[in-house]
Image: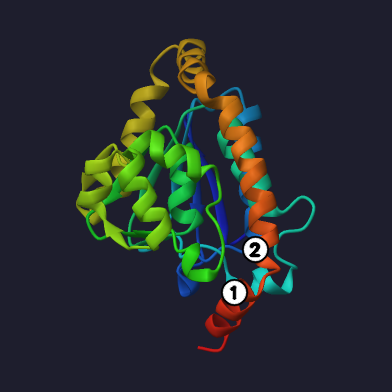
Amino acid sequence: MNEQILYTKAGAIATIRLNRPEKKNALTAAMYATLSKAIGDAERDADVRAIALLGGSDFTAGNDIADFVASGGMGDDPAPVRFLRALGDCSKPVIAGVRGAAIGIGTTMLMHCDAVVLGDSVKMAMPFTKLGLVPEGGSSVLLPLIAGRMRAWWLLLSSETFGAEEAMRIGLATRVVADDATDATAVSMCEQLAKLPPKAVANAKRMLKQPFAELVRTTMDEEFRAFAEALRGDEARAALMSFLQR
């Protein structure tokens, strides 16, 4: 991989780790491309039975805004969308271990994982409206399915920050643990799944996702078009420029 995305294997477990701590793991186009490759590598490796998706003291602060603006934001086939599709289409179980900041796509990507372990320091937010944008990553359909319509609508409309206790309460987390136990717990859950018959696990995952798969795909496409349109608007340009001038 590269120094900002680390890929390791231990037995049947592949670990993908975000490793840009000086920027709170803010994601660049190059990092998204490497994440997509890492998921693809794990998917094709017959020895891998589960994937741990980890950060550091922060999971990710979301998009690196400077890189996002410099790379043209949302082109015809943007790297963030390719990554989310790779994550959502992965047939092997993906378990995320999340501490610190999990902002924007740092929250929405978790809706495509099969289990989420949160450290008790986590701070989550989907600040799309705050940036003059719209929800992404299928969150406009997935979050209401997970959290219920009223809570999901508030979180997506208000850009409000919330913590591990609220995430657990509304169904965005599988377990909440002490920060220093986050990674080990996620890996241990991967090991638990890796001991099970792999075809049975893959088939169970496919059947759990199937009822909503087409809806999620079409919603992501609609979100992508709306996000790209919003990005060209005055509100988003002003918000992004304000952020860059801090």
Instruction: Please state if 30 lies on the left or on the right of 199 as rendered.
Output: right
> Disc 2 versus disc 1: distance between alpha carbons?
8 Å
Q: Residue at x 52, y 53 (%)?
A: 135
Q: Residue furthest bottom?
A: 245
* 71 versus 14 height, above or below: below
Q: Earlier in the sequence, mark 2 or mark 1?
A: 2
> Circle 1: is it few (<14), some (14-19), or many (20+) Cα within 10 Å?
some
- At numbered mark 2, what does the secondary structure look like: helix, strand or loop? helix
- In which quadrant of the rendered view does residue 116 lie? top left
Q: Which residue is mark 1?
A: 235
| Of the pair 149 and 63, the residue shown nearer to us | 149
* Residue 230 location (% of width, % of height): 64, 63
Q: Is residue 90 visible?
A: no
- Residue at image position (46%, 65%) is 61
Q: Circles 2 and 1: CB distance less than 8 Å?
A: yes
Residue 60 spot, x, y in % from top left: 46, 61
In the depicted view, which residue is nearer to us: 155 or 202?
155
Position of residue 215 relative to residue 73, above or below, is: above
Residue 212 disc label: none
Residue at the spot x=65%, y=53% of the render? 226
Residue nearest the viewer, comparing 219 with 18: 219
Question: What amino acid is labelled 2 in the image?
Answer: Ala
Q: Quadrant location of residue 85?
A: top right
Name the amino acid, label 1. Answer: Glu
In the image, residue 29 above or below residue 76: below
Q: Which mark is residue 230?
A: 2
Residue 124: x, y in percent?
Answer: 35, 58
Taking depth in this image into account, of 18 and 86 the one nearest to the observer is 86
Q: Is residue 58 above or below residue 181?
A: below
Tell me the crowding category of disc 2: few under 14, some 14 to 19, or many 20 or more residues within 10 angstroms, Cα based: some
